[in-house]
Image (cartoon, coloured by chain):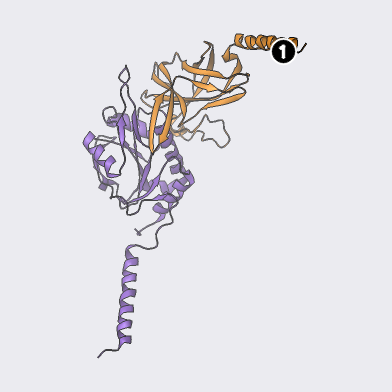
Amino acid sequence: MKHTLVLTLLAALALATSGHAAAAAADHVHATHAWIRVLPDALPAGAYVTLENNDNQPVTLIGASSKAYAQVMLHHSSTTGGVSRMAMVDSLSVPAHGDAKLAPAGYHLMLTQPKTPVEPGTTVRLLLKFSDGSSLPTDFVARPANALDDGTAAGASTGHADHRSH
Amino acid sequence: MKSPWLRLLALLVLLAAGAALASCHSSAPLPFRLTNLTGHMPQLEFTLTNDEGKTVSAEDYRGKVVLLYFGYTHCPDVCPLTMAHLHVAMQRLGKLADGARILFVSVDPARDTPAVLHSYVNAFDSHAIGLTGTPRAIEGLVKRYRSAFTREPASKDGSYEVSHSSAIYVFDRDGNPRVLFTPADNQDDLVHDVHLLLSNTGQS
């Protein structure tokens, strides 16, 4: 009697898990606050985004690509002992029912060699790639070099550089 | 024979005069909130090339409160974040900020030409100046402030990163190091201390 119950539960669990595996990671991820800090002269730029995962299991971001840039790399900045370093990383896990932030001085996407100059105020589409092969197209707003965030937060530094971008 | 009281009086007069003399040179220390560097590091000294291609020395910035930062333009994350924070600090200082200069010294002179630095610093703040120079001159300045930088191994396409000190050294109008600002510090404290230095005239 008890055995049957356990078996039934296990079978149900297996079904549930396989059901989840079939749904792409990208379907469970919601991207917000996506922005790029645009630097002059086609210098490498940092891209930032908040990823929310509504799934019961973690999803793993492994990188991104964009038609607007020759290369996109997942990076992590750290400051230890008063020294700032930047290193390439393979992946970033977004916990189940949690979020992961790509934000200045931490995880970011490094965008290099824009194919055409990217102007602040425009949007650039990036394809966020996950370990299961799925991808999430996300529009990133291009912000001036001296912006501190995507410009939507309360009290955000908005348009401080407006006089320069006109 | 002199009275011991007269001797004591003379001594007291001398002491008072000494104290008065000393106070002419250093009045009460400024109430800084950041790490106080006063007296711990040498005066600002360098000969470098500015972002207009002109040779400049530290003397050219005497009379200005200087915020010194070592960085490089191919740094997409931490350097622009620091410069953006300095821009906000300058904005908060309002008109007083005209008495200050942000000196962005490149630790990557191979790629950071005056032209690259010019558009870079101007994208952040009108009080920012980009400086570059010979590796020897840059290393000299970095070492003068017990700072450091390391060029990391290049990737396949030849691009590379530079690990560097994240601190900002703040100098008074006479070129004396006064406070150190690190990423762990509060921006309010930076604004407070730079404001003190900007509104402090004639004291040292």
Residue B33 position within the rendered picture, expressed as x and y whole percent measured from the top left? 45, 51
Display colour for chain B: purple
Residue B94 position within the rendered picture, expressed as x and y whole percent measured from the top left? 45, 46
Residue type at mark 1 is Val
Give the quadrant of residue B167. top left
- Which of B73 and B167 lies nearest the eye of the viewer? B167
Display colour for chain A: orange
User: In the visual, does B170 lie left or right of A136?
Assistant: left
Could one spot residue A57 in this view of the protein?
Answer: yes
Write down the residue under mark 1: A6
Q: Is residue B132 above or below residue B200?
A: above
Q: Is residue A118 above or below residue B103?
A: above
Give the quadrant of residue B47. top left
- Which of B104 and A119 lies nearest the eye of the viewer? B104
Which residue is rendered at x = 58% and y = 35% of the image?
A154
Which secondary structure, mark 1? helix
Which residue is rendered at x = 31% and y = 37% of the image?
B148
- Which of A83 and B89 lies nearest the eye of the viewer? A83
Q: Which residue appears farthest toward the bottom when viewing the image?
A: B1
Quadrant occupied by the C terminus of chain A: top left
User: In the visual, does A5 lie left or right of A125?
Assistant: right
